[in-house]
Amino acid sequence: MVPSAPRVGVFQFGKRPSFAYLGPIEWDRSGSLVYGLWIHIAPGNERATADIRAPSALTLILDSGPVVLTAIDAPQLGRGAYQPVASWGQTAYFDLTVEMLKQMAASKTLELNVRNADDSIVNFVPTVDTQAALTGYLRARGITGD
């Protein structure tokens, strides 16, 4: 995801643009499947991002309205499903239910609002078709539209 309204000069030589990466993840806890949302924020060099695990730091914007994300602790077994993209970025896991995953896949709008350290908000928009990607994930996991 990229900022919806990049600041003038963000893509100039010497300027580092901001990016946000999202990915659903499934954990098998002794036969009980639990879901989470992996998020990695790689801030540019224009503003410092607040702690993404802080309450109300990240909000998903869907067709059905805003959803404030709640940070969770990921299981410490094995290796992560996704690798951080930028060493200076922040990575965290967030609570995700099957119902929310279905809402995300069905939504034409999927944006991410990220709070900066100065309380300003950066709105990230996708660079790929999120509906197709998330619908494919649901199908691959055997999650159907009950």
Image (cartoon, helix red, strand yellow):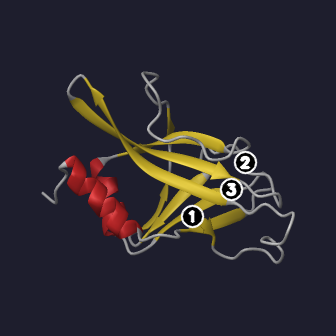
Q: Residue at x 83, y 72 (%)?
A: 12
Q: Is residue 20 above or below residue 125?
A: above
Q: First in sequence: mark 3 or mark 1?
A: 1
Three-letter code, disc 2: Ala
**Quick one: label 3, few (<14), some, or many (20+) residues within 10 Å?**
many
Residue 87, quarter of picture = top right
Residue that label 2 marks: 50
Residue 71 position, x and y percent, is: 52, 40
Is label 2 in a helix, a strand or a loop? loop
Q: CA distance from mark 1 to mark 2?
A: 18 Å
The numbered disc on residue 133 is none
Residue 50 position, x and y percent, is: 72, 48
Q: Is residue 68 above or below residue 91?
A: below
Is label 1 in a helix, a strand or a loop? loop
Residue that label 3 marks: 115
The numbered disc on residue 1 is 1
Three-letter code, disc 1: Met
Q: Is residue 140 at least partly visible in the picture?
A: yes
User: How many marks are shown on the rendered structure?
Assistant: 3
For residue 121, side relative to residue 78 (left or right) = right
For residue 2, side relative to residue 145 (left or right) = right
Q: Residue at x 78, y 51 (%)?
A: 117
Residue 121 position, x and y percent, is: 69, 63
Q: Are marks 2 and 3 in contact (CB under 8 Å)?
A: yes
